[in-house]
Image: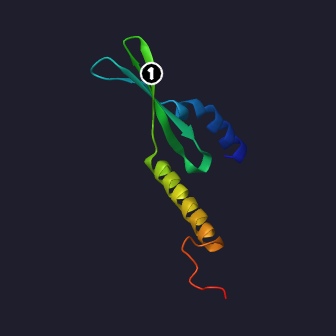
Amino acid sequence: MKLRDVVNQSEANAAARIYGEPYETTDGATILTVTRYRGVLGPAPVGVFVVHGGTVSWEPAVDGNRVALFGEFIGLAAAVIATLAMLRRPPWPDLVQKV
């Protein structure tokens, strides 16, 4: 099998990898999972469509790792800005008097 055949086969199966098989719960709701294909990294969950009583709703999948990484980045940026401000001019008074 050549690389071109593999690429063509993966493009043909893209819809099956993005939308999962719908299934029905005991209360009559139909669930349809949605994923995002990220190439070599594989699929990542995006969320689910819920069909219940004739209405469709979207429930996004929240990635806790991404939220935590964003919080760590904000903390690191605040620490760098505070360090640069301290190096420029410390907030405490000068202990040396000019004569």
Give the residue furthest to the bottom. Answer: 99
Q: Is the residue marked by circle 1 packed among few (<14), some (14-19), or many (20+) residues within 10 Å? A: few
Q: Residue at x 59, y 71 (%)?
A: 86
Residue on which the image places disc 1: 57
Given residues 34 and 91, the one toward you in this image is 91
Given residues 17 and 89, the one toward you in this image is 89
- Residue 14 lies, in percent from the top left, at 60, 34
- Residue 79 lies, in percent from the top left, at 54, 64
Given residues 60 and 24, the one toward you in this image is 60
Q: Which image quarter is the C terminus in?
A: bottom right
Is 54 placed above or below 40 here?
Answer: above
Q: Residue at x 45, y 37 (%)?
A: 61
- In the displayed structure image, the side of residue 88 where residue 95 appears, left or right: left
- Residue 75 lies, in percent from the top left, at 51, 59
- Residue 88 lies, in percent from the top left, at 65, 71
Is 41 placed above or below 26 here?
Answer: below
Q: Residue at x 66, y 85 (%)?
A: 98
Tell me which corner region of the image, top left, top right, bottom left or bottom right, holds residue 29. Answer: top left
Q: Residue at x 63, y 68 (%)?
A: 84
Q: How many marks?
A: 1
Please state which amino acid type lies under the numbered disc 1: Ser
Give the residue furthest to the right. Answer: 4
Given residues 12 and 97, the one toward you in this image is 97
- In the displayed structure image, the side of residue 50 where residue 36 appears, left or right: right
Is 5 placed above or below 93 here?
Answer: above
Helix, strand or loop at disc 1? strand
**Colour scheme of the rendered structure:** rainbow
Give the residue furthest to the left. Answer: 26
